[in-house]
Image (cartoon, rainbow, N blue to C red):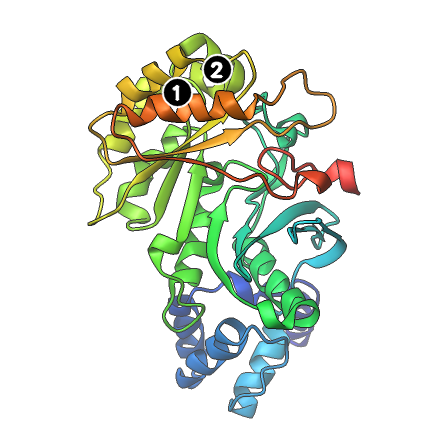
Amino acid sequence: MKIAKRFELFYFRYMKLSFYDLTFTDLLEVLHKNQLNSFGAQNLYNWFYKQKKSYPCKMELSQETKNFLENRYSFDLPKIHKVIESEDKTVKFLFELNDGSKVETVLIPFHQKYSICLSSQVGCAMKCSFCFTGTQGLKRNLATSEIVGQFIAAWQWLERNRPNEVRILNIVYMGQGEPLHNFDAVKKSCEIFLSKNGTSIGPKKITISTSGYIPGLKRWKDEIPGVNLALSLHSTETQKRNELIPINKKYPLEDVITYIDSIPLSKKQFITYEYLLIKDFNDSIEDAKKTGELLKGKEAYINLIPFNPYPGTSYERPTDQKVEDFKKELQKFKIPALIRTTKGDDVLAACGQLNTAQND
């Protein structure tokens, strides 16, 4: 019995679970199961999520609860290995995880506020030809705590370094990895972000991007209702999309669109279609017409993204005039289109430029 007890203490000392893996419901269940006051859950979520504070929690907790947490849970966040600041105030973090793996996270500024671009995997299995991350291959999925930890650690960095700008209003899962390929951890991180007891971010302030991974889309409408969805479209032509997004061969665009069309949308909710424009590849007026024909009549919104070059790529950025002409053609189909302003490209922090090996 004494040996078993010593083993238990050893296990929880060196193999602690992360607090940031617990949804509010999980935390209530843990406290209840261990005969601890469930009121402590609100105080803990308030301290670590509403206030984004570090361990230990200085709100009212019983000594028994404090001891339990100390023995069973880790409150470690991803470590900031490197911070690179762009001239336009974009911030790119290289985070180191407990096993030595690294991921990149980006804070994108707008009007003294920020959107945060989160990674969901170490590397990516999709091998999209326009994306620097795709050259890494997939190392592993991130745990919920590693996704949530990016947000908290970035917030704390702002608090220390830009104290007048500590506002992250939007979360986009558009960093390294295919979010729907790591569905369970991404879903759970959304539950934590949405919790009214914690960060209390509205569902329309969270956007999850996908290259068209149908197994995740099949689960979407039942398990992540209300959160925004963005599809990496980039071309309506099979041959071109196969080159840009190889999983299009397994999950063709027409099937992806069918699943997306089945997702119930709330009032004023749109599906965002991301269209990366590459010079002399998919930026013609004919490409724009085919895109308009595909999306006309849908609750669709298109983000036009001029290609952001990265080391080793053969693709080139189109001219500003080409991008404007593409947008004008889409508008003939009454589809709202926005040209996304490039930010952070001077430090390889723009869309498609993330690669941990590049900045290690």
Camera sees residue 8: no
Compare residues 326 and 52 and report the one nearer the observer: 326
Quadrant assignment for the C terminus: top right
Distance, label 1 to label 2, CA atoms, is 20 Å
Question: What residue is shown with label 1?
Answer: 251
Q: Which residue is mark 2?
A: 282
Tell me, for residue 210, which label it has, or none.
Answer: none
Total marks in image: 2
Image location (x, y in percent) of residue 159: 64, 71
Residue type beneath disc 2:
Asn
Q: Amino acid at mark 1?
A: Tyr
Q: Is residue 141 visible?
A: yes
Relative image position of residue 205 (x, y in whole percent): 39, 55
Q: Secondary structure at mark 1?
A: loop
Binning the other alpha carbons within 10 Å of mark 1 as few (below 14), some (14 to 19) or many (20 upward) gives some
Examine the image and state in which quarter residue 345 appears.
top right
Residue 266 point in image, percent of width and height: 21, 49
Whole-percent x, y for residue 355 in the image: 69, 36
